[in-house]
C-alpha cells in the first residue's frame, strides 16, 4: 500500500479541491480522507505543498514507432509522458508502416504494455493515409484500436467522412480530424499573415482550417441527429463545460483559428456530438514566435494571431474546447535545422504541458486548477471511454503529484528529441511524482527527502 499524505486533492468530476490523504492498494484508490500513518504502509509520500490529481491523459501523441524511431520510440515517449505527469496516452497512426492493419496495431499495443504507463493507439481512417478507402474499422477496433484518425493529413472526401462517422457511432469510438484544406496552403506550418509577409512566405491561412471544421461540424450534426444523439449542449447541461459523454463521435484536433472555434461552438449548441482539443503551444504562443524560434515554432496548424490565441483561451474557459492535448511531435536536430519552408512541422510537448497550463491559464486567472485538471485528465479520458481521469475511491491508482508553485527552467528532456521553443523559459508548476497502476513510475529527484 502507498500512503500519500498532506496533499491538496483535486476531484475534476466534482470540481472540488480539499486537503486529504490518499491510500492506494492493488492498483486502485482505496481511501481519500484523513488517516494516521501506523507504519503498515509500504511507501509514504509526503505531498506537502503539492497537488494530488488524476494522472494526465493525452489523446494526441506521436511516438514515431514503428519506422521513425530515431526521433522517438514507444519507450522514450512513455518516459517523457511519465515525467510530464501523464499516465495514459493515445498514439497517432501516421507511423511507417501506418497503423492501418492488425499487425502494426498489435505491435504498438504490445510494445506499449512494456512501458510503465498506459500506451494506447489509434488506427487510421483510410488505408495508407491516402484518403480514398476506409480501413476495416470493425476489425481494427476488435484488435484494440482506441479510436481512428488520419492525423497529419486531412480527409478531403466529405462522403467518406460521413460514412466513417456513422461507423464510429456504431462502434462507439471517436474519430479525430486534422483540419487543414491543402487547397488554401502554399507553405505549411507558418500562418499567412504579418509574419509570413515579413519573411516573404505565403504560409497557411486560417481559412484552410475554417473550411474543413465547418464541413465536419455540419456532418457531425447530421450524423448525431441520425443516431438520436442531439440535445442541449449548454453549459448548464455539463456538456459544454467539458464533461464529454461517451457518444461523442468526432473530435476536432489542435484548434488554432477563432472562426473555427465559433463553428464548433455553434455546432455544439445545435446538438452535434463533437469535442475539440487545443495544444499548449497554441494557447501560449502566436505567429511572432517564428521570428524568435524559427523552425522550433513551425507546426501544423500554425501559430496564429493574438486574437486567435485569446479565442482559444476563451473557448477552453467556456468549454467549447473540451481538452488540452500536446500533439507531441518529435523531430531530430538535423531535420529542424533545415530552412523554414523545408523543415518538418511540430514540437514536443509532454514534459511542459502541465506547467504551461498552470503558467498561462491558472496563474493568469483563466482557469482554476480543478478546471485545468479536468481538461487534461477527465475530459480526454471520457472522449476515449476510458476508466481514468477520476479521483474517487475505486478509481484506478493513476495519479500525478505536482507542486503548483515551483518555478523551473526548461533545460532537458526525457524525450529522444528536444525540438521545443520553450527551452530556456521559466515556468510554474513542476511534477514531483507520477503513479500508474499504483506504482511510482517517475519521481523528481529533488522530491526525495
Image (spheres, grey):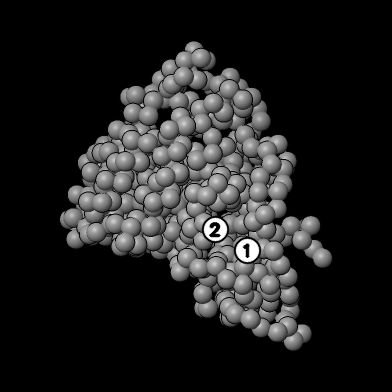
Q: Which numbered disc covers residue 369?
A: 2
Q: Nearer the viewer, residue 239 or 224?
A: 239
Q: Please tell me which residue is depicted at 26% across the width and 51% down the height of the picture.
A: 269
Give the farthest residue toward the right.
449
Q: Quadrant of the C terminus?
A: bottom right
- Is disc 2 surrounded by few (<14), some (14 to 19) or many (20+) residues within 10 Å? many
Q: Residue at x 33, y 58 (%)?
A: 235
> In this picture, is 67 found above or below 396?
above
Among the two numbered marks 2 and 1 on one chain, the one whose residue lies closer to the N terminus: 1
Residue 292, given in percent of the width and then of the height, sits at 61, 25
Whether the residues at callouts 2 and 1 have beta carbons within 8 Å, the answer is yes
x, y percentage for residue 384? 41, 59
Marks 2 and 1 sit apart, C-alpha to C-alpha, by 9 Å
Q: State how many labels appear.
A: 2
Q: Looking at the rendering, which quadrant does residue 179 occupy?
A: top left
Residue placed furthest toward the top: 200
Label ID, residue 51: 1
Amino acid at each position: 500500500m502507498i500512503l500519500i499524505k498532506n496533499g491538496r486533492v483535486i476531484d475534476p468530476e466534482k470540481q472540488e479541491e480539499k486537503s486529504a490523504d490518499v491510500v492506494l492498494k492493488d492498483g486502485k484508490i482505496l481511501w481519500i480522507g484523513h488517516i494516521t500513518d501506523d507504519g503498515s504502509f509500504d511507501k509514504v509520500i509526503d505531498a506537502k505543498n503539492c497537488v494530488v490529481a488524476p494522472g494526465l491523459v493525452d489523446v494526441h501523441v506521436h511516438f514515431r514507432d514503428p519506422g521513425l524511431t530515431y526521433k522517438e520510440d514507444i519507450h522514450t515517449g512513455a518516459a517523457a509522458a511519465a515525467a510530464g505527469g501523464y499516465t495514459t496516452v493515445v498514439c497517432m497512426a501516421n507511423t511507417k508502416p501506418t497503423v492501418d492493419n492488425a499487425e502494426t496495431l498489435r505491435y504498438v499495443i504490445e510494445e506499449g504494455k512494456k512501458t510503465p504507463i498506459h500506451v494506447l493507439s489509434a488506427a487510421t481512417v483510410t488505408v495508407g493515409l491516402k484518403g480514398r478507402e476506409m480501413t476495416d474499422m470493425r476489425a481494427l477496433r476488435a484488435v484494440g484500436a482506441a479510436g481512428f484518425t488520419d492525423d497529419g493529413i486531412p480527409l478531403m472526401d466529405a462522403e467518406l467522412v460521413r460514412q466513417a462517422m456513422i461507423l464510429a457511432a456504431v462502434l462507439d469510438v471517436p474519430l479525430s480530424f486534422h483540419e487543414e484544406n491543402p487547397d488554401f496552403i502554399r507553405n505549411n506550418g507558418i500562418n499567412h499573415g504579418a509574419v509570413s509577409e515579413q519573411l516573404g512566405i505565403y504560409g497557411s491561412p486560417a481559412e484552410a482550417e475554417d473550411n474543413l471544421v465547418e464541413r465536419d461540424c455540419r456532418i457531425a450534426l447530421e450524423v448525431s441527429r441520425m443516431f438520436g444523439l442531439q440535445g442541449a449542449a449548454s453549459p448548464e447541461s455539463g456538456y459544454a463545460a467539458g464533461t464529454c459523454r461517451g457518444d461523442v463521435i468526432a473530435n476536432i484536433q489542435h484548434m488554432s483559428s477563432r472562426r473555427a472555434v465559433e463553428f464548433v461552438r455553434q455546432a455544439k449548441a445545435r446538438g452535434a456530438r463533437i469535442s475539440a482539443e487545443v495544444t499548449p503551444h497554441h494557447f501560449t504562443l502566436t505567429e511572432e514566435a517564428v521570428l524568435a524560434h524559427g523552425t522550433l515554432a513551425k507546426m501544423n496548424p500554425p501559430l496564429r494571431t493574438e486574437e486567435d490565441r485569446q479565442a482559444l483561451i476563451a473557448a477552453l474557459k467556456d468549454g467549447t474546447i473540451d481538452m488540452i492535448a500536446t500533439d507531441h511531435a518529435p523531430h531530430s536536430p538535423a531535420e529542424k535545422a533545415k530552412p523554414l519552408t523545408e523543415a518538418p512541422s511540430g514540437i514536443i510537448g509532454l514534459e511542459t504541458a502541465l506547467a504551461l497550463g498552470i503558467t498561462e491559464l491558472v496563474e493568469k486567472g483563466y482557469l482554476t486548477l480543478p478546471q485545468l485538471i479536468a481538461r487534461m485528465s477527465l475530459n480526454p479520458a471520457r472522449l476515449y471511454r476510458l476508466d481514468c481521469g477520476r479521483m474517487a475511491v475505486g478509481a484506478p491508482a493513476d495519479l500525478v503529484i505536482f507542486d503548483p508553485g515551483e518555478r523551473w527552467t526548461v533545460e532537458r528532456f526525457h524525450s529522444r528529441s528536444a525540438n521545443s521553443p520553450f527551452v530556456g523559459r521559466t515556468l510554474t508548476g513542476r511534477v514531483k511524482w507520477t503513479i500508474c497502476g499504483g506504482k511510482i513510475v517517475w519521481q523528481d529527484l529533488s522530491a526525495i527527502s
